[in-house]
Amino acid sequence: MAAPACPRPALLSGPLSEIRTTLASHWARLGSRSRRLRFLGTPDESFFPRFAARLNPLFVIGIRIDGKVRGVCEAHMLPSNHAEIAISIEDAWQGQGYGRQLFEAGLEKAAEAGVETVDLFFSEENRSIAHLARSLGAEMKTSYGECEAYIRLEGRRADRS
């Protein structure tokens, strides 16, 4: 019997309402520390559907395990060909390389969409994302326990000729 295929990031498609529901369900499965790291606070269950309802992401990439989206990379467009990326992985699936896969897929998709720079905002406590951002060429700033990472996407676009 063959081993199960390793999950890979894939663009979430379908109606925006379904993507919002998928995001809210994923966030609700995050543990308290993961919620704090993703949202820079500890929102309760009622927050997630309300927050998701306001989103109009440029794209959402997910990793599906056991039929559920267990990790996501969301990109939200900002002015001037600039986007913000947020990544979250459910607790049981952390430390297995899914964050890197999602981050790299998100940067590639953002570059394909014409985004020139990407930002990440996170708690100084989130050493994993800080290490990952640095390894992917981010410029970092830290202030009052919060970090900002900026990544230029020039040269990351796939050759489409």
Image (tube, helix red, strand yellow):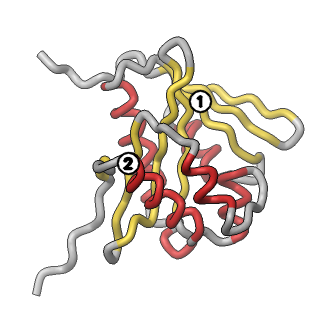
Give the image location of residue 132, x and y in percent.
Answer: 55, 45
Alpha carbon separation for disc pair 1 and 2 = 17 Å
Which kind of residue does numbered mark 1 sit on?
Asp
Figure quadrant of the N terminus:
bottom left
* Residue behind mark 1: 119
Give the image location of residue 4, x and y in percent.
Answer: 21, 77
Q: Pick whichever, 17 or 148, lies toward us.
A: 17
User: Does residue 97 appear to the left or right of 2 in the view shown?
Assistant: right
Please, is residue 137 above or below residue 12 in the view? above
Residue at the extreme bottom: 1
User: Does residue 73 appear to the left or right of 129 in the view shown?
Assistant: left
Give the image location of residue 101, x and y in percent.
Answer: 39, 51
Q: Pick whichever, 64 or 134, lies toward us.
A: 64
Mark number, residue 72:
none
Mark number, residue 61:
2
Which kind of residue does numbered mark 2 sit on?
Ile
Please, is residue 32 above or below residue 110 in the view? below
User: Does residue 157 appear to the left or right of 32 in the view shown?
Assistant: left
Give the image location of residue 117, x and y in percent.
Answer: 51, 21
Residue drawn at point x = 38 percent, y = 56 percent: 18
Quarter of the image where one finds residue 66: bottom left
Q: Helix, strand, or loop for circle 2?
A: strand
Q: Earlier in the sequence, mark 1 or mark 2?
A: 2
Q: Helix, strand, or loop for circle 1?
A: strand
Residue drawn at point x = 34 percent, y = 33 percent: 109
Figure quadrant of the C terminus:
top left
Residue drawn at point x = 39 percent, y = 39 percent: 59
Quarter of the image where one finds residue 54: top right
Please, is residue 53 above or below residue 6 in the view? above
- Mark 2 crowd level (few <14, some 14–19, many ≥20, 10 Å Cα): many
